């Protein structure tokens, strides 16, 4: 079978919006040049679309034209390495998914242990947030929540009070084990994040492990997070002003 036919057969089996490179075909074709030429011919014919240099995707059409791939597909090479998690979507990338804002951003933020300068990929800006905790599949939803609490003042199209209401609704649905884990993970976040998390958990009636959070804070330091008094009544216990 010709290299082009082999590549076409593989792509036909891929789901719409799937992002790939020539490297995905190297076990099936004879050379890099053959794969690149075949892919570029398919781009020219409209069978596939080009995301950025060396990256292609299987397009899905709508009444508005070609749909962009999901954000995970756009940056999946930055999130996994040989099936090992090395990063996760966070920040602006997930505020909408968490129900914190209705806005959708063209900036994709990624949490990683080792960060790099921001760069452009297609029409997206790819930016990075340093994560000091070990990244695991189970910890990612909790890290995403902690990141949002950390950057509460930067969440677009909402207020601090509304964001806290949403945070508490999310926390209320977490299991006791998840709450224990999120408190442990929070110990590697800034003091203001720990204080706000503690105040919200106390407001929700949690008592277990809160002393761990309280003990991690300087008792004479205050944290300025305005407009919380009507929503979170425990702010004074956590030196939030």
Image: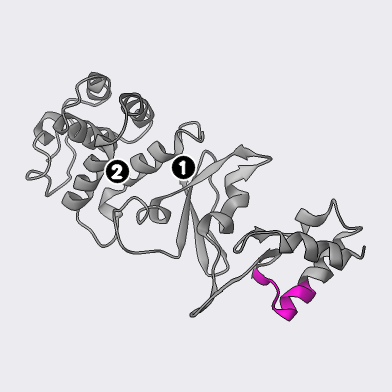
Quarter of the image where the N terminus is located: bottom right
Up-down: is 173 above or below 208?
Answer: below
Q: Which quadrant, please, contains the C terminus?
A: top left
- Which is more toward the observer, 159 or 193? 159
Q: Position of residue 81 (x, y in %)?
A: 65, 42
Q: Is residue 124 left or right of residue 210?
A: right
User: Image height check: is 238 above or below 99?
Assistant: above
Is 236 left or right of 99, judged from the image as shown? left
* Among the 4 quarters of the image, the one containing residue 56: bottom right
Q: Which residue is mark 1?
A: 130
Q: Residue at x 31, y 62 (%)?
A: 102
User: Which residue is painted at 65% across and 66% down in the image?
Assistant: 58
Q: Earlier in the sequence, mark 1 or mark 2?
A: 1
The answer to if 103 sits in the magenta stretch is: no
Question: Which-is-in-front pick, marks 1 and 2?
Answer: 2
Residue closer to the observer: 70 or 210? 70
Q: Is residue 164 above or below residue 159?
A: above
Left or right: 67, with 21 as reference point: left
| Residue segment shown in magenta | 40-50
Tag 1 secondary structure: strand
Q: Which residue is mark 2?
A: 149
Residue 76 is left or right of residue 110, and the answer is: right
Within-10-Å neighbours for mark 2: few <14, some 14–19, many 20+: many
Q: Nearer the viewer, residue 87 or 48?
A: 48
Q: Position of residue 7 (x, y in %)?
A: 81, 63
User: Residue 1 or 93: which is nearer the viewer?
Assistant: 1
For image coordinates 35% across by 42% down, the residue present is 145
Which residue shows up at 25% across the image and 52% down it? 153
């Amino acid at each position: 079978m010709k290299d082009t036919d082999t590549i076409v057969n593989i792509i036909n089996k891929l789901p719409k919006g799937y992002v790939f490179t020539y490297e995905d075909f190297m076990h099936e074709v004879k050379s890099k040049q053959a794969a690149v030429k075949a892919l570029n011919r398919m781009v020219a014919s409209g069978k596939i679309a080009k995301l950025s240099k060396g990256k292609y995707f299987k397009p899905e059409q709508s009444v508005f034209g070609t749909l962009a791939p999901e954000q995970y597909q756009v940056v999946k090479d930055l999130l996994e390495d040989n099936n090992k998690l090395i990063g996760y979507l966070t920040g602006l990338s997930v505020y909408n998914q968490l129900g914190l804002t209705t806005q959708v951003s063209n900036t994709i933020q990624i949490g990683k242990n080792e960060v790099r300068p921001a760069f452009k990929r297609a029409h997206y800006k790819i930016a990075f947030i340093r994560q000091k905790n070990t990244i695991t599949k189970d910890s990612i939803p909790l890290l995403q929540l902690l990141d949002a609490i950390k950057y509460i003042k930067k969440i677009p199209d909402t207020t601090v009070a509304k964001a806290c209401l949403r945070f508490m609704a999310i926390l209320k649905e977490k299991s006791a084990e998840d709450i224990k884990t999120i408190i442990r993970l929070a110990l590697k976040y800034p003091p203001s994040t720990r204080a706000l998390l503690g105040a919200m958990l106390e407001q929700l009636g949690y008592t277990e492990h809160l002393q761990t959070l309280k003990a991690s804070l300087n008792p004479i330091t205050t944290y300025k997070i305005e407009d919380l008094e009507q929503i979170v009544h425990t702010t004074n216990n956590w030196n939030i002003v």
